[in-house]
């Protein structure tokens, strides 16, 4: 009886240890993603600004063993901006960029291992959605009424699709993004542009 009790204790202990080890392995993944790179406008949006620096911060949660969901933001500083046309009263006016744009949202990540030996070498397939904001201001020489706003914030949603190649704590990424800035703002010029590419380096921890 004593031997049977010892055997049962050993079996239960081994089972608990194995479950803890498996759970630790399941929970062992990078949660913080810090990104730096560039935004390249394409199509008609390429007339509004040039290649511009971009920075991002994302926090990751696990859905299952290979599927994740991220929450965070990317912001960029448009370079060599062109003054787009906005409607002001009964006139068409060239607004100036406030040199700031930001995307806030979430993205789904599907992780595909690329090595049987090294679990930290993988490819990610990312699909994102969120809110895109781009800030412009009216020229100072306009005659504004008291309390009238002098800025235009282009607010729209965005959809993105991209890939990451990760090795240990470093990754390379490239994303296509569609942001129809003129969809919800009838003051902005037609065919403002909506397409861009974001690429750069990722540090994950």
Image: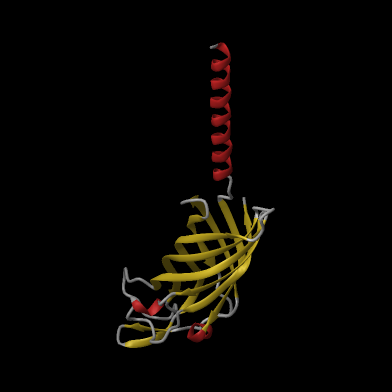
Quarter of image, res 152: bottom left
* Count of marks, rendered view: 0
Direction from residue 164 to residue 160 in the image, left or right:
left
Q: Residue at x 57, y 20 (%)?
A: 7
On screen, residue 102 above or below 24? below
Direction from residue 166 to residue 148 in the image, left or right:
left
Front one among 156 and 96: 156
Front one among 181 and 97: 181
Front one among 116 and 96: 116
Quarter of image, res 181: bottom left
Q: How is the image coloured?
A: secondary structure
Position of residue 137 measured from the top left corner of the image (x, y, whole percent): 44, 74
Direction from residue 137 to residue 118 in the image, left or right:
right
Position of residue 166 measured from the top left corner of the image (x, y, whole percent): 64, 60
Q: Residue at x 42, y 77 (%)?
A: 138
Q: Which residue is drawn at 64% across and 57% down?
A: 203
Position of residue 127 measured from the top left corner of the image (x, y, whole percent): 47, 66
On screen, residue 16 above or below 32? above
On screen, residue 23 above or below 12? below
Q: Which residue lies furthest to the top in this view?
A: 2
Position of residue 41 measured from the top left corner of the image (x, y, whole percent): 54, 79
């Amino acid at each position: 009886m004593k031997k049977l009790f010892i055997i049962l204790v050993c079996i239960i202990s081994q089972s608990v240890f194995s479950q803890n080890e498996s759970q630790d392995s399941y929970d062992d993944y990078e949660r913080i993603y810090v990104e730096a790179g560039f935004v390249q406008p394409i199509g008609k949006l390429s007339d509004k600004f040039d290649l511009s620096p971009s920075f991002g911060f994302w926090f990751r949660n696990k859905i299952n063993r290979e599927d994740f969901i991220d929450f965070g933001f990317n912001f960029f500083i448009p370079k060599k901006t062109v003054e787009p046309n906005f409607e002001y009263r009964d006139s068409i006016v060239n607004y100036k960029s406030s040199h700031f744009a930001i995307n806030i949202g979430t993205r789904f990540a599907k992780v595909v291992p690329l090595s049987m030996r090294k679990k930290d070498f993988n490819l990610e397939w990312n699909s994102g959605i969120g809110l895109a904001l781009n800030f412009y201001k009216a020229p100072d020489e306009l005659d504004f009424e008291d309390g009238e706003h002098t800025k235009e914030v282009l607010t729209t949603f965005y959809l993105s699709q991209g890939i990451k190649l990760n090795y240990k704590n470093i990754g390379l990424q490239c994303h296509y993004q569609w942001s129809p800035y003129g969809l919800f703002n009838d003051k902005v010029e037609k065919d403002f542009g909506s397409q861009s590419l974001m690429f750069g380096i990722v540090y994950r921890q």
